[in-house]
Amino acid sequence: MPPTEPPEALLALALQVARDGQLPSAETATAARTLAPASRKLPPAMVRQAFTELLVCREVHLALQWLHDCGVLAEWLPELEATVDFSQEAGRRHKDVWEHTKQVVRQSVPRPDVRWAALLHDIGKVPTRTFTPDGGVHFHRHSEVGARMFDEVARRFAFDRPTYKKIRFLILHHLRANQFDGSWTDSAVRRFAREMAVHLEDLLDLSRADITSKRPGRREAALRSISELAARIETLHQEDALQPPLPTGIGNTIMQHFGLSPSRQIGELREALEQAIEAGQLEARREPEYYLAQVAKLLGR
């Protein structure tokens, strides 16, 4: 690759790698590194679009490796470049975050926002890694740190606000579904689904992709756990559609009992009751009188 090539040629070559799976030669990568610094002068929208296109390709893991090899990754995503050869387990170099990330991206669903989140979900591990006296490794709150780091990435790539918010949400919560076990109550499952809201499907798909263990049976067990969570969410959704957690007409009952007029306050009281049910503080599907006692506490009566 001659030094006279425009820097956007690096992105075009990366997309070609993502599509055909053929990595350029080491000599080409060496020559390409002279162009990498100039890529920072490219319009952010152009680079973002190029990354987005290659992220959804079949051979994305090879394209990402090429971006590292030619120096573009270090120029545009130094947060991700820092994960190369960064160990997740003491004494196990093959467990570095970079290799894990490439695998997660490759096995995630090819939706752009999910793959961007997969690409960046573990960047918070670099500044949060700590070692324990017994040789263990911890990354406390790396999802929160990673979400904050993404703020700068989003500005660098000039993401539009809705896309930025979605990817940030997925990075922030990427561990949540994998924390599920069969002991969760129905209220806990409802609360999880409510908090994930419109991002639920993407988050579950990201969580499935984040399972990369090679230990016999561990990957299968983790995937079954996420499937169980998804099934319980769907079952509760169907049950609630047939018979909502709160009795029909609870808003009118509240107004009549406490002498209140129709207002936003009634909706807020109803929402507070729903949240108390989801938190396990109140039982679902009880008689209206049962909920009036809670409303009285909320009103200070």
Image (tube, rainbow, N blue to C red):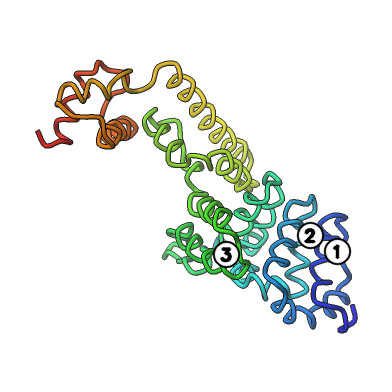
Q: Quadrant of residue 248?
A: top left
Query: Tag 1: Cα neighbours inside 10 Å, few (<14), some, or many (≥20)?
Result: some
Give left or right: position of 297 versus 228: left
Mark 1 in CB contact with mark 3 (< 8 angstroms): no
Percent x, y for residue 122?
A: 56, 59
The three-letter code of the residue at mark 2 reads Leu
- Image position of 4 with respect to 132: above or below: below
Q: Position of residue 11 (x, y in %)?
A: 79, 67
Kindly state the secondary structure of the residue where label 1 is placed: loop
State the residue position of label 3.
154
| Residue toward you, 287 or 177 | 287
In the rendered view, tell whether residue 290 sits above or below residue 43.
above
Q: Amino acid at mark 3?
A: Ala
Which residue: 59% across, 43% down? Answer: 202
- In terms of secondary structure, where does tag 3 sit? helix
| Label 2 – label 3 distance at C-alpha | 23 Å
Up the image or down, 98 lies above or below 247; here it is: below
Q: CA distance from mark 2 to mark 1?
A: 7 Å
Disc sitting over residue 23 in the figure? 1
Say whether disc 1 or disc 3 marks the residue closer to the N-terminus: 1
On screen, residue 274 versus residue 15, left or right, reads left
Q: Quadrant of the C terminus?
A: top left
**Foreground pick, 79 / 211:** 79
